[in-house]
Amino acid sequence: MTESTNKKVAESLWKLIMARGIILIVIGLILLLFPQATLTTLIFILGIYLLIDGIVTLFNTYKQKDVRKNWWWGLITGGLGIIAGLIVVLKPFSSTVLTTSFLMWFLGLVALINGISGVVTGIRINKYHTGARSMIWGGIFSIVLAIILISSPYTSALVVVKIFGSFAIFAGIITIFLANRVKKKAQEIEE
């Protein structure tokens, strides 16, 4: 590559990097400022997907009923997809609360099991292993996290969205700094 080509590549590259940084910051702000709307929108999109998938499954099942031995499975899964999709589309907020609550309860249960396991294992190996106390403290932390997730699942989901928003803003700022460094290097390249 020639110096001129390097300069053109660097000049266009910094703009792309800058755009990515700005987009990350905008996404982060949306997640931070509108966590409930973000969750509801994602669940609504999932509902539309389930509805369309259910319709397509029923259509394909009907077309293939003469050649498929267990075609009725397609009727069941397609029908359930349509029902689930309609529920989510018609009741997006309720569906969001239920879906995110279920997910947080599940994660809370996993954290509780891991926490209890960590504490019990840490106590058992305390005499023989120097890292046992870390395992016990990690287990206690997991149990506390589990209690928070299980006792307030929807609020926990909103907090998770805000954490992702914070990370997106942080990544956007770093990306913008990188874009400025690339821009500066592009200006230093002689034609």
Image (spheres, rainbow, N blue to C red):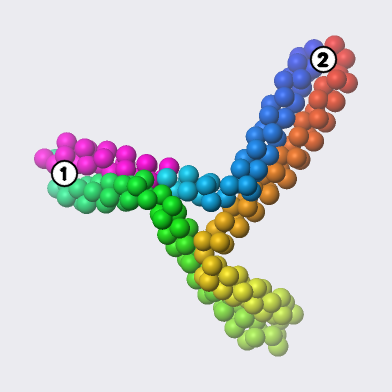
Please, what secondary structure does the residue beneath circle 1 have?
loop
**Quick check: 56 left or right of 88?**
left
Q: Residues within 10 Å of mark 2 (few under 14, many from 20)?
A: few
Q: Quadrant of residue 8?
A: top right
Q: Is 2 included in the stretch rendered in magenta?
A: no
Q: Which mark is residue 4?
A: none
Question: Residue placed at 11% from the left, 40% from the top?
Answer: 66
Please, what secondary structure does the residue beneath circle 2 have?
helix
Q: Is 57 included in the stretch rendered in magenta?
A: yes
Does residue 2 show up? no
The magenta stretch is: 45-66
Question: Residue placed at 43% from the left, 42% from the top?
Answer: 45
Percent from the top left, x then y, of residue 69? 14, 48
Query: Which residue occupies the foreground of this view, 8 or 58?
Result: 58
Percent from the top left, x then y, of residue 70? 17, 50
Question: Residue placed at 41% from the left, 55% from the top?
Answer: 94
Residue 54 vertical placement versus 160 (above, below): above
**Sequence-first tag of 1 and 2:** 2
**Residue under pointer 2:** 3
Q: Residues within 10 Å of mark 1 (few under 14, many from 20)?
A: few
**Residue under pointer 1:** 68
Question: Residue placed at 59% from the left, 83% from the top?
Answer: 120
